Image (tube, rainbow, N blue to C red):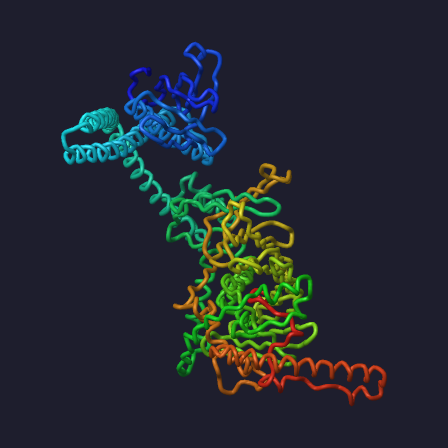
Amino acid sequence: MSEPKPPTPTGGDTYKGWLFKWTNYIKGYQRRWFVLSNGLLSYYRTQAEMGHTCRGTINLATANIAVEDSCNFVISNGGAQTYHLKANSEVERQRWITALELAKAKAVHMQAESDDSGDECPAVPPTPGQGGGRNSEVQSTLRTLNSKVEDLNTCNDLIVKHGSALQRSLSELEGIRAGGDMGEKIRQVTERATLFRITSNAMINACRDFLSLAQSHSKRWQKALQVERDQRIRLEETLEQLAKQHNHLERAFRGATVLPPSFSNPSLGNKGGASGKGDASDEDDENEFFDAMEDPAEFITVPADPKYHRRSGSNVSGLSNETGMDDQSVNFDELSLASNPESPQPLELEPVRQRRTRIPDKPNYYLNLWSIMKNCIGKELSKIPMPVNFNEPLSMLQRLSEDLEYYELLDKGAKCQSSLEQMCYVAAFTVSSYSTTVHRTGKPFNPLLGETFELDRLKDCGYRSLCEQVSHHPPAAAHHAMSEKGWSLRQEITLASKFRGKYLSIMPLGSIQCIFEKSNNHYSWKKVTTTVHNIIVGKLWIDQSGEIDVVNHKTGDRCHLKFAPYSYFSRDVPRKVTGVVTDKDGKAHYVLSGTWDEKMEFSRIMQSSKGENGTEGKQRTVYQTLKAKEIWKKNPLPDGAENMYYFSTLALTLNEPEDGVAPTDSRRRPDQRLMEDGRWDEANAEKQRLEEKQRTNRREREREAVKAASSPEEADAGETGTEASEVSDETDTEDSPPHTPVACK
């Protein structure tokens, strides 16, 4: 009924034959002529229809092939098309299955190659001539060899499958007795042996073709490889010679000396003369650039191959003379500070305090958040009482102090000679403050009015920090930090938050100020919106989204950072952050990219130009940049962090008891201490008692305020004192807004 075609067609070969196709329950199976070609299975009523009428076609690249019984099999592409087919015999059915599987493997491979070739855009178009022809020939040969390898893999799978079936039949044949079943078993063994022979022949043919191709091209490839090696050696020798010449020219230029006679060659003289303008030509000769595309809303940075950025050891600074932005400027500052005899030297070494590295594990208490939140939809969060089960044993003041975990970024920024490079470190510090929030789904304790937290790390880190709760309703905190390395930081934070049922939005209000003493550069920025998802069902997860403008009020420099919100349909990496550093005239100098939970990189922009229009019709800007370099990387979490509220190494030490702290310090809060010790029931009871006391104190303050307003002459007598002295007695209140760990980050 079908033509005796081999079951392993290759390339453009076709496989044709008669099969029975299921039509409907009235007509049942109908005889149709099927043609398999180029990964497509088509059928016709008769062979005569092949020239003009095709009844149906299915693409095997996305199809699923299933065997139902000895003669029936099904081909489906996910529901849109389904062919129920039947062959005359099991052998005929297996021939079709073998041909279909080979055609499917080839179609999938060709589709993958097509997708890869469509995604890749060559940086330089292939030049016509011998080089382009050789490359095309090699690519064609590789595609052919890959096709043969796919055929070998498919045949190998089929041989294993049919060999196992043949072995089972032989075992059954040995176990049965002579009788009526003997003839049926012998027939099955004969059919399966035939299938095994067909598949083995296909495997042998494919191996022979592959071996022939490999042998015919082996000598040609070896010769081409040797030519490439010789060219590489000559290129390396030329580059080494150019590097030596450049070294002499650079030294002569920097020393303002006359060039020796050996370098009086006109071409070399021109090169040396051109370097007098900030060594721009030298930088262009030695550095390869890559393009970074930017939309008005975002841009993408593509890292370049490291081999294009090798620099000679003598090339200390190319464009650094112009802007002071060389990659090694910080290292040179550190060396100069270390070698400066006037720099203060420690007279004696004091032992650094060993701080704790663990806290008690978090108890496994179950509490349904939705049972508490379902009646609070649309309300202000300051009106929602929360048990400590959803807290973490830190206050919001301590969470604000966690912003200083990567204080080294500001230390490095203080050493920068260029305000633009300093801006990069400040921007990286801004992003790093969110790195601890990715797993922190518990909310900190809300501070009392007058509560403080002092973080003194002068001996080990060189900075000291102080936070205070300066307003009760609305809650607001002030934070000030100073460093011996020449920078200071202050921030005033209050919160606007809403619960929307499925997610929780927290909008920090207020600004952050950073001042460097040496340059007197004054930076300011604000925080982005924090969203806590899956409040109702599922696992809580946190996202940061929005835009930040870091502004240098002295020079007018600006860095625009964009925190991309998470999207299930986005191809970008999750938690992506991008930014561009510009001067007061709007000229871009640096590109920053990375994620707020892992690391940030920065690249220096060498040239910019207008590119294609973006998806919204706005014209893109093409930046030519140097290779990206890492500016910040998140510290790994300590061992067992998942059992310690995902605290970082710094967070584990924030609530550690210390002598000499103020009575208003957050470390003295009893409910917070009880929670850290794992005594949650006692912590909840203490919290409930103190909330009632807090409400009473608030009503008393309101009455005194009304009385003072009605009797101005008694205003001084009615002035109330701070509650800071009661920090050791009071704790988080239901009048203070609950705060997730990301609210202060």
Q: Where, by quadrant of the figure, is residue 14 drawn? A: top left
Q: Which x, y percent locates residue 562?
A: 58, 53
Q: Is residue 450 visible?
A: yes
Residue closest to the far top: 48
Residue at point 66%, 62% (across, down): 377
Q: In the visual, does 532 lie left or right of 364?
A: right
Q: Compare residues 155 and 25 and report the one nearer the observer.
A: 25
Residue farthest toward the bottom in the current orientation of the protein: 717
| Front one among 204 and 581 | 204
For this view, does 639 lie left or right of residue 731? left
Identify which residue is drawn at 30% across, 18% down: 5
**Which corner quadrant of the image does residue 151 belong to?**
top left
Q: Tell me the quarter of the picture where residue 128 sits.
A: top left
Front one among 606 and 315:
606
Name the quarter where the C terminus is drawn: bottom right
Residue at (54% x, 71% y) in the render: 391
Observer-nearest residue: 392 or 587?
Answer: 392
Give x and y (percent) for residue 575: 52, 54
